[in-house]
Structure formats: C-alpha cells, structure tokens
C-alpha cells in the first residue's frame, strides 16, 4: 500500500485523512519533520530563486518515499511547481486537495462588510491530469 507524504502548510483534517485511506488506498500518512515544516511555511519572499532553499525538502522526500507513494503538495506557487516536478522525477504521485467554499457576508454600519469563508475538503486531484 502506498504512503501519503504531506508537504503543505496545514494539519491534515479527518475528512482528508479518511479520503486518503478510502480513495487513495494509503497506509501511512507522513508529515514533514518540524524543522522542514517551518522551512516550507516560511519561504522568504525576497529570494529570487528557491530551488537551493528547497533542497532539504527534496532530500527528505527522496530518502523516505518510494515510487507510487502520494505527495500532497500545497503552498507557495513556485515552491509547489518545483516540488511537483521533483515528485514526478522520483516516480511519486503529487496531489492536491480540492475544496468547496462557502462564504457568508455580514453588512455593518458605514458600509463595512465582514466576510467569513469556510473551506471543506472535497477530493484529492493529481497534478498534471
């Protein structure tokens, strides 16, 4: 059974976990170690190139995942692009979570509007398909 490696900024929800086990057939769900999670969450906006910055993530993934494992990749667009390509090179299956969005608007005095958004996982989708 394949594993699911998490490279994203959030904690996996129970709905996502259930979906991964049921529809992807994953056995284990493996989160980034804390130091790599911090690195992924705080990609410096002033770096013009980030491939070298992401090298520790690539090394961790290459050292732990095997072909046909899934990798949930979401975050900084450029970093996702690099890591998705890296996953393909290693024979992994990069995926992302799709969501249903619900918005609620509250109108206040003087024209202010308070928006509340609720995001609910729907399915996992493979990159490049």
Image (cartoon, grey):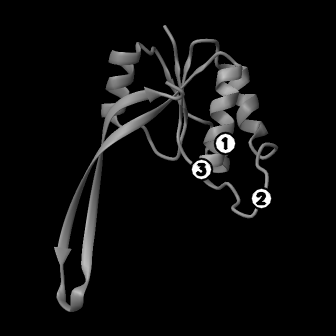
Q: Which residue is mark 2?
A: 47
The residue sitting at the front extreme is 129
- From the image, state whether disc 3 or disc 1 is nearer to you: 3
Question: Which label was assigned to residue 92?
Answer: none
User: 6 or 28: which is nearer to us?
Assistant: 6
Q: Quadrant of residue 113?
A: bottom left
Q: Which residue is mark 1?
A: 36
Q: Residue at x 73, y 32 (%)?
A: 58
Element assignment for label 3? loop
Q: Residue at x 66, y 35 (%)?
A: 83
- From the image, state whether disc 2 or disc 1 is nearer to you: 2
The residue sitting at the right extreme is 52
Label 2 vs 3, first from the N-terminus? 2
Would residue 30 be found to the left or right of residue 104 on screen?
Answer: right
Q: Residue at x 76, y 49 (%)?
A: 50
Q: Residues within 10 Å of mark 1 (few under 14, many from 20)?
A: some
């Amino acid at each position: 059974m394949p594993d699911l490696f998490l490279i994203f900024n959030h904690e996996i929800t129970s709905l996502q976990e259930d979906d991964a086990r049921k529809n992807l057939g994953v056995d284990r769900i493996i989160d980034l170690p804390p130091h790599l999670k911090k690195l992924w969450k705080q990609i410096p906006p002033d770096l013009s190139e980030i491939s070298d910055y992401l090298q520790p993530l690539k090394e961790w993934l290459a050292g732990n995942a095997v072909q046909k494992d899934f990798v949930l990749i979401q975050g900084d667009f450029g970093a996702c692009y690099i890591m998705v390509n890296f996953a393909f090179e290693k024979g992994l299956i990069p995926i992302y979570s799709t969501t249903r969005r619900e918005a609620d608007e509250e109108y206040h005095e003087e024209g202010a509007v308070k928006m509340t958004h609720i995001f609910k996982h729907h399915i996992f989708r493979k990159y490049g398909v």
